[in-house]
Amino acid sequence: MTSGLWEIVLRGVWVTVQLLFFSAMLGALVAFVVGIARTHRRRSVRFLAGCYTEVFRGTSALVMIFWVYFVLPPAFGWQLVPMWAGTLALGLTYGAYGTEIVRGALNAVEPAQWEGGIALGFTPWQRMRLILLPQAVPEMIPSFGNLLIELLKGTALVSVMGMGDLAFSGNLVRLALQESAEIYSYILLIYFAIAFLLARLMRGLEKRLKGGVA
């Protein structure tokens, strides 16, 4: 490929990395807020959190992107730029999967730990922040690592909005070259390289957190 075509691909990589970062941050926020809510002592809070989780886990991320980008603007009279539409749709969708990771890890903490916090007079938030989360978070990392890689692959869906991510840029280069095998081989390798880097970073984070707990 020529340098000009590589420039298009590299711009697509940068857009994909930005989208991955922003949607991962939103997804993590959603996962922890809703995941903690799913362990709340009030049934109404657990019910609402469960409704959110089931709705967003049960809908297609691609359809959600269409909904956020094409359906909401006419309904509310505003238009999101593709980056923020993709961030919102992917963050809310993958965050719903993350809620189950958080809920499962919190429920896996020994009940005696929670009871010990009650005996010490801790408030529910203090018990969560000082006792439960420090033990649960290291156990969440492997699952969050897998979810992050799934999110990376899900970023390719934003190409339906004409957003210049890696998948969209690769298609532009394919049309320019009239050659599919070469460009899509490069695109696969780039996605693999990013996923491999993410896996190594999450593995390092897991070791660091578990070392700190130990």
Image (tube, rainbow, N blue to C red):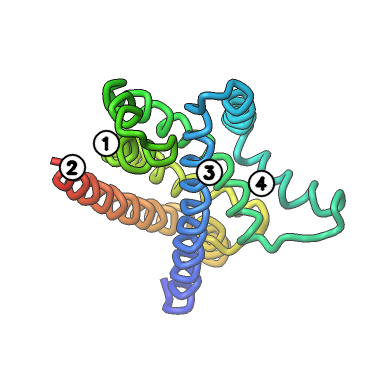
Crowding at label 1, few (<14), some or many (≥20) Cα neighbours within 10 Å? Answer: many
SS of the residue under disc 3:
helix
Looking at the picture, does residue 49 appear above or below residue 90? above
Q: Which residue is mark 2?
A: 213
Circle 2 Cα neighbour tier, 10 Å, few/some/many (<14 / 14–19 / ≥20): few
Q: Considering only order in the chain, which callout, 4 or 3, is on the residue closer to the N terminus?
A: 3
Q: Position of residue 145 (x, y in %)?
A: 33, 43
| Residue type of the residue flagged with mark 1 | Gln
Residues at discs 3 and 4 in contact (Cβ within 8 Å): no
Left or right: where does residue 138 sit relative to residue 74?
Answer: left
Q: Nearer the viewer, mark 4 or mark 1?
A: 1
Q: CA distance from mark 4 to mark 1?
A: 35 Å
Residue pictured at 32% horizontal, 42% vertical: 130
Numbered label attached to residue 65: 4
Q: Earlier in the sequence, mark 3 or mark 1?
A: 3
The answer to which of 137 and 192 lies nearer the viewer is: 137
Separation of disc 3 and disc 4 at Cα?
A: 17 Å
Residue at the spot 27% in from the left edge and 36% down from the top edge: 135
Q: Residue 81: horizontal and vertical position, in percent?
A: 69, 63
